[in-house]
Image (cartoon, rainbow, N blue to C red):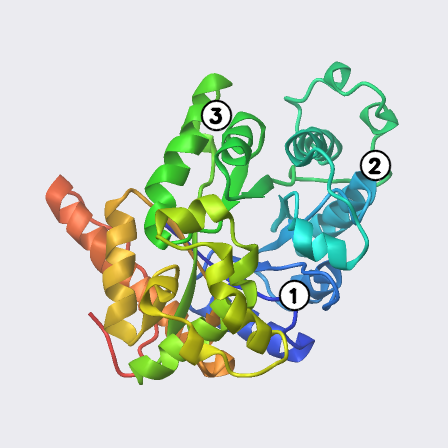
């Protein structure tokens, strides 16, 4: 079982370092930093984390092949691998058409462009199972980076749709499916595994985190309000296909989005159906939904913002709840199988434990 934390690139560098050290102390495996446009540079932030942590895996979730040339993405990834001593993973995705449009960028052929970028990146970042002959027109296929890569950098695909998830299974090292709702993991897993099978690859070598938004607070209403404001901001850009499965459409979020994009509180306009797209409430609410994900076969839980109404302290709460929940699930699974479960050490500084 693996655990990771995802944080936005709007977090101040000093706060991000504090959260990374907390995650490392709590035994998390990875910390991913987003790379949303017009905010802080994720490669710079992760570089700072690389020299301030020692065991925590680090990643960017995600860069895209439109705003930065793929060779420059590879240069940043290889440098971060060198700085971190082999602890870096790269997330790559097609990006949001709406958000790229803010920068005047088009997004032609997202599936094909992302697929080719994954192949080029894996070739440049030390993977030996990529055939350069399959990359016509790419001089990068014939010219290595001028620095040691060391351990090959795992390349993950940030994806939500079925074709992109299938492609990730075919050619990437992992996928980062942002799940709306978290229980969509069962569908995403099947789509990835279909791609793995089609390419004749090993499922055991592929990392598939269950990525979801979480907001936890001692006051359940405060936890839900924090998630509601995040959903208000991002709701219109969520895949219509995924929203339809929850009985929603992007337009349902527009009244709340107008408030959120002006920096106003939009929680009152986000209903329970919308809130079901993430996990929010008191500690036990989060525990119960995480149990369901483990039952669906998730072996890597990845919790993402808003984390709670007070991100500094709530990050620690969220980490603690998730680790504690999964420790219980591991012991239950081990008891059923008649084997001893791994011991996971957690902190209990917020007064709840299973």
Q: Is residue 251 visible?
A: yes
Badge 3 marks a residue whose secondary structure is helix
Residue count near mark 3 (Cα–Cα under 10 Å), binned few <14, some 14–19, many ≥20:
many
Question: From the viewer's perspective, is residue 35 above or below residue 232?
Answer: above
Instruction: Give the alpha-carbon distance from disc 2 to disc 3, as whole Å.
Output: 29 Å
Would you place residue 211 above or below residue 257 in this image? above
Q: Nearer the viewer, mark 2 or mark 3?
A: 3
Q: CA distance from mark 1 to mark 3?
A: 33 Å
According to the picture, the residue beneath numbered tag 3 turns out to be 195
Which of 218/129 is in front? 218
**Circle 2 residue:** 145
Circle 2 sits in a helix, a strand or a loop, which is it?
loop
Residue 122 location, x and y as percent?
A: 68, 32
Total marks drawn?
A: 3
Q: Is residue 204 visible to us here?
A: no
Q: Residue at x 73, y 16 (%)?
A: 134
Q: Specify few, some or many for label 1: CA neighbours under 10 Å numbering under 14, 14-19, or 20 or more.
A: many
Q: What distance separates the C-alpha of mark 2 from that of mark 1?
A: 23 Å
* Quarter occupied by residue 296: top left
Q: Which mark is residue 49?
A: 1
Which quadrant would residue 154 be assigned to in this image? top right
Residue neighbourhood size for the residue with mark 2, other residues' Cα within 10 Å, grouped as few (<14), some (14–19), many (≥20): some
């Amino acid at each position: 079982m693996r655990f990771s934390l995802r944080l936005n690139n709007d977090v101040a560098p000093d706060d991000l370092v504090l959260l990374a050290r907390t995650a490392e102390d709590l035994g998390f495996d990875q910390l991913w930093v987003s790379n949303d446009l017009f905010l802080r540079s994720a490669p710079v932030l992760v570089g700072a984390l690389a020299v301030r942590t020692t065991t925590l895996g680090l990643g960017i979730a995600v860069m895209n092949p439109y705003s930065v040339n793929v060779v420059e993405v590879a240069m940043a990834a290889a440098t971060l691998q060198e700085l971190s001593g082999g602890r870096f993973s790269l997330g790559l995705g097609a990006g949001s058409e709406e958000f790229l449009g803010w920068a005047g960028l088009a997004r032609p052929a997202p599936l094909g462009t992302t697929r080719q970028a994954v192949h080029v990146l894996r070739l440049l970042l030390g993977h030996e199972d990529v055939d350069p002959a399959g990359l016509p027109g790419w001089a990068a296929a014939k010219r290595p980076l001028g620095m040691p890569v060391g351990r090959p950098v795992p390349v993950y695909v940030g994806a939500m749709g079925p074709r992109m998830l299938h492609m990730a299974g075919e050619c990437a090292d992992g996928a980062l499916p942002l799940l709306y709702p978290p229980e969509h993991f069962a569908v995403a897993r099947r789509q990835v595994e279909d791609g793995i099978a089609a390419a004749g690859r090993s499922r055991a070598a592929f990392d598939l985190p269950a990525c979801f938004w979480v907001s936890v607070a001692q006051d359940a209403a405060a936890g839900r309000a924090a998630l509601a404001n995040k959903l208000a901001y991002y709701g219109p850009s969520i895949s219509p296909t995924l929203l339809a499965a929850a009985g929603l459409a992007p337009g349902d979020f527009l009244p709340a989005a107008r408030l959120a994009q002006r920096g106003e509180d939009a929680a009152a306009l986000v209903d329970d159906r919308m809130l079901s797209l993430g996990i929010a409430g008191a500690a036990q609410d989060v525990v119960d939904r995480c149990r369901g994900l483990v039952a669906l076969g998730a072996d890597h839980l990845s919790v993402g913002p808003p984390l709670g109404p007070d991100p500094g302290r709530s990050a620690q709460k969220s980490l603690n709840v998730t680790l504690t929940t999964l420790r219980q699930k591991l012991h239950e699974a081990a008891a059923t199988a008649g084997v001893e479960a791994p011991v996971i050490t957690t902190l209990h500084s917020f007064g709840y434990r299973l």
